[in-house]
Amino acid sequence: MKRAVMALSGGMDSTSLLIHLLNQEYFVDCVSFKYGQKHIIEIEKASENIIYLKNKGFTVNHEIVDLTSAMSIFHSALTTDEMEIPEGHYEEEQMKATVVPNRNAIFSSIIYGHALSIVSREKKDVKIALGVHSGDHAIYPDCRPEFYESLEQSFRIGNWDSEKVEFLLPYIDDDKSSILLDALLCCDELELDFDTIFSNTITSYNPDSEGRSSGKTGSDIERILAFKEIGRIDPIDYVESWEIVLENAISTELKYKDEYYKEKLTDIQYNVTRNSSTEYPFSGELWDEKRFGKYTCICCGHLLFTSEMKFDSGCGWPSFHSEHDEASIKQIEDRTHGMNRVEVKCSKCDAHLGHIFNDGPMKYGGERYCINSASMGFEERE
Ligand SMILES: [Zn+2]
């Protein structure tokens, strides 16, 4: 059987990773770390899942490694009693209080040593699986892929048999909801109960005495939105009902995004994309743009159109007869201003782009995407 070693925190990503590895027919050694974290309940949850998986006939090892004494000298809101766990959005500056200095390097060192021990004991190649994904990078620099590349390089130089150990990062390009969706699909294939598995996880850094999450810390909000995204109700207990925690998560996310866009965009870009305003005809930068290139959403960079789809309609706004194959632009009936129109929005970030009319060139189907310049970025191509 293929061998893998991984850190199992009891959170969502590492639990998904374990299920993913089992679905890939790995025999997995999980290591959970006690490091003085206030949310120590996560290790009990991890252990419950291991029991569930063993009862289902899977071969999984679980080691709990105690680093409390070594890491008690560190300073972090996750471990220090005098520091409060911050509430709010995951990417806000205050969430940096939840960084534990050098934590992933310490955990990885131990896991690497464990992997090398399996190599020498079992004479097998071993993968070190990491649940690292794109969403963690903003706050946690030790989740960046380049950090792991460099770490792997260092470990290689400093160890015999290191050619038999390799890092495996299956989620590196994924976000929280696609990881959760992967777990859902793997559970189906392995005939495991998704709700049981995820009720044995905890994401909150400050659960109450009954182990319930407030639903208000940055990591709670990320989790709640991931469940919403895949159309499931989170099976863990919150202090308040699912409806209330979900509503709070959505409004926190919207408020965060709104502030982010206000800072990132010009006034006209913000008003058009976030408040559905319309720029004056012949006023935008792109209505008369004739160069080759691609048009992307100004808010999120999503590809919308290419210059081959643009035509001169004479209306004063950039006009396109078709959208890019992968754009999946959202069409919404719009009855405002006494008109009956079809509004178009970015499928990725919901930015208002403009409207679709039926007076486009017939040879392309007759549609005219009438788009605000302010909603788009343009990248020239030769
Ligand atoms: Zn967008």
Image: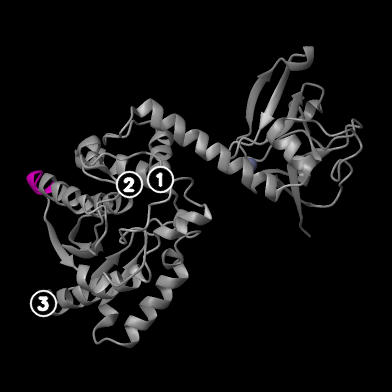
Q: Is mark 3 within 8 Å of ligand 1?
A: no
Residue 224 horizontal/vertical position (percent): 39, 38
Residue 215 horizontal/vertical position (percent): 37, 39
| Mark 2 surroundings: few (<14), some (14-19) or many (≥20) residues within 10 A | many
What are the residue bounds of the magenta stretch? 53-57
Which badge, 1 or 2, is on the more N-terminal residue?
2
The answer, for residue 173, to whether it is visible in the render is: no
Q: Residue at x 44, y 72 (%)?
A: 147
Q: Which residue is mark 3?
A: 121
Q: Is mark 2 within 8 Å of ligand 1?
A: no
Which badge, 1 or 3, is on the more N-terminal residue?
3
User: CA–CA distance between discs 1 and 3?
Assistant: 43 Å
User: Which secondary structure, mark 2?
Assistant: loop
Q: Nearer the viewer, residue 52 or 286?
A: 52
Q: Which residue is mark 1?
A: 217
Residue at the farthest top position: 338
Which amino acid lies under the numbered mark 2 shown in the image of this protein? Ser
| Mark 1 surroundings: few (<14), some (14-19) or many (≥20) residues within 10 A | many
